[in-house]
């Protein structure tokens, strides 16, 4: 495990900047006669979708982020450098895990912590790897081609890197751990698939058994998966509602209140085996999954899921904004 802590000089510089900003902010509050204890809408930071889009594009630019490849390592280095810029502490959890096909994968779960001393914590997470095969591509010739995973992988991480940038400029009222899980998408190839199995979410399974801090706990977690396609529909995912109904309600109500009810539908979706399943069942942290579900496609996800067309053309800034602004609002209201 590698742990990177912010140097004192950078920290001191940040504290001075924050003090100056909060002074300016206080004067504004006085002239507006707002109650000091109440969180006004203006105290919720603005999520920048252009910035998030750029972070998605950057990940995709390395090529498919398949474990044991150069592109995967280069992307890891970039993610670590961004979280080192923005977070108070960065943990890089390196491990070897065995894939369903017997391959040993060198994986890295990358964790950026904000307010690391705070006892009350929230996890925001996504997977950063991309699938080694387009086994749902309409063309069978592509069924062993690795994918860009612009939506399936990079979108959630792009939103989280933008949230990290926001958290570096605005102190949240709670501790936050941004966890980027590896090897979520190395699950069984469609040709070998039978019943539900543990071949997916290898990074989060490892972390749930070996958290970056012993006895680590958080009051809840929010997983983002496929959060970038146009007109995405985030139906209520069933494991989320089973393990963390209160968090589902809070997040969906927040989205609807701030104007994103067209994305956050109250329709019930299906049970999806994803990183949050292991965070709930192994680690015992109530965690929800914001995931694009569409029943009209046989597989139940967005049209280009696990095809070579899951590229930047799929990504829509408005969807990134709907998800990012909702999560930022939930975090800063901290109800
Ligand atoms: C299964 O298909 C078993 N789980 C979907 C989880 C997933 C794949 N998320 C992204 N890619
Ligand atoms: Zn996938």
Image (spheres, rainbow, N blue to C red):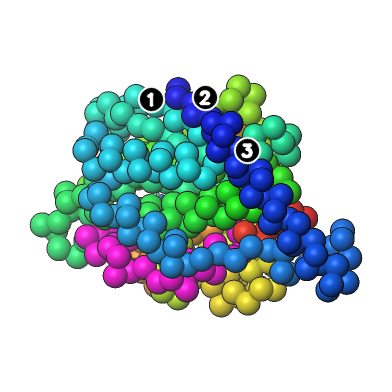
Q: Position of residue 21 (x, y in %)?
A: 68, 56
Q: Mark 2 vs ligand 1: CB under 8 Å?
A: no
Looking at marks 2 and 1 on the same chain, the residue that comes earlier in the sequence is marked by: 1
Mark 3 vs mark 2: in front: 3
Q: Residue at x 73, y 61 (%)?
A: 24
Residue assigned mark 2: 210
Is 12 in front, or is 263? 12
Q: Is residue 314 magenta?
A: yes
Look at the image and tell me whether residue 207 can be seen. no
Q: CA distance from mark 2 to mark 1?
A: 10 Å
Is 16 in front, or is 87? 16
Q: Are circles 2 and 1 on residues that touch, CB within 8 Å?
A: yes
Q: Are circles 3 and 2 on residues that touch, CB within 8 Å?
A: no
Q: Is residue 60 left or right of residue 127?
A: left
Q: Residue at x 45, y 22 (%)?
A: 1
Magenta segment, which residues?
304-327
Badge 3 density bin: few <14, some 14–19, many ≥20, Cα 10 Å = few
Q: Find residue 12 and name its label.
A: 3
Looking at marks 3 and 2 on the same chain, the residue that comes earlier in the sequence is marked by: 3
Look at the image and tell me whether residue 307 can be seen. yes
Based on the displayed image, in which of its 4 quarters is residue 96 positioned? top left
């Amino acid at each position: 495990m590698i742990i990177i802590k912010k140097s004192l000089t950078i920290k001191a510089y940040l504290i001075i900047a924050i003090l100056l900003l909060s002074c300016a902010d206080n004067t504004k509050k006085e002239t507006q006669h707002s109650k000091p204890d109440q969180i006004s809408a203006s105290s919720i930071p603005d999520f920048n979708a252009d910035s998030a889009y750029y972070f998605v594009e950057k990940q995709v630019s390395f090529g498919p982020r398949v474990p044991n490849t150069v592109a995967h390592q280069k992307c890891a280095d970039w993610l670590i450098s961004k979280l080192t810029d923005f977070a108070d502490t960065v943990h890089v959890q390196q491990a070897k895990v065995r894939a369903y096909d017997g391959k040993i994968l060198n994986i890295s779960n990358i964790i950026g912590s904000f307010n690391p001393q705070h006892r009350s914590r929230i996890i925001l997470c996504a997977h950063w790897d991309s699938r080694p095969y387009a086994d749902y591509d309409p063309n069978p010739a592509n069924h062993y081609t690795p994918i860009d995973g612009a939506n399936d992988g990079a979108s959630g991480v792009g939103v989280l890197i933008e949230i990290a940038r926001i958290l570096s400029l605005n102190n949240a009222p709670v501790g936050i751990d941004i966890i980027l899980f590896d090897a979520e998408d190395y699950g069984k190839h469609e040709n070998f698939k039978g019943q539900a199995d543990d071949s997916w979410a290898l990074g989060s399974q490892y972390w749930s058994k070996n958290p970056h801090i012993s006895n680590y706990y958080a009051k809840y977690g929010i997983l983002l998966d496929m959060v970038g396609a146009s007109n995405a529909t985030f139906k209520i995912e069933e494991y989320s509602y089973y393990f963390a109904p209160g968090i589902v309600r809070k997040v969906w109500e927040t989205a609807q209140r701030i104007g994103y009810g067209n994305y956050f539908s109250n329709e019930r979706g299906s049970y999806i085996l994803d990183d949050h399943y292991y965070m709930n069942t192994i680690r015992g942290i109530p965690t929800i999954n914001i995931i694009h579900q569409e029943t009209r496609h046989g597989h139940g996800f967005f049209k280009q899921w696990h095809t070579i067309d899951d590229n930047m053309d799929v990504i829509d800034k408005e969807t990134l904004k709907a998800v990012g602004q909702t999560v930022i609002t939930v975090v800063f209201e901290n109800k």
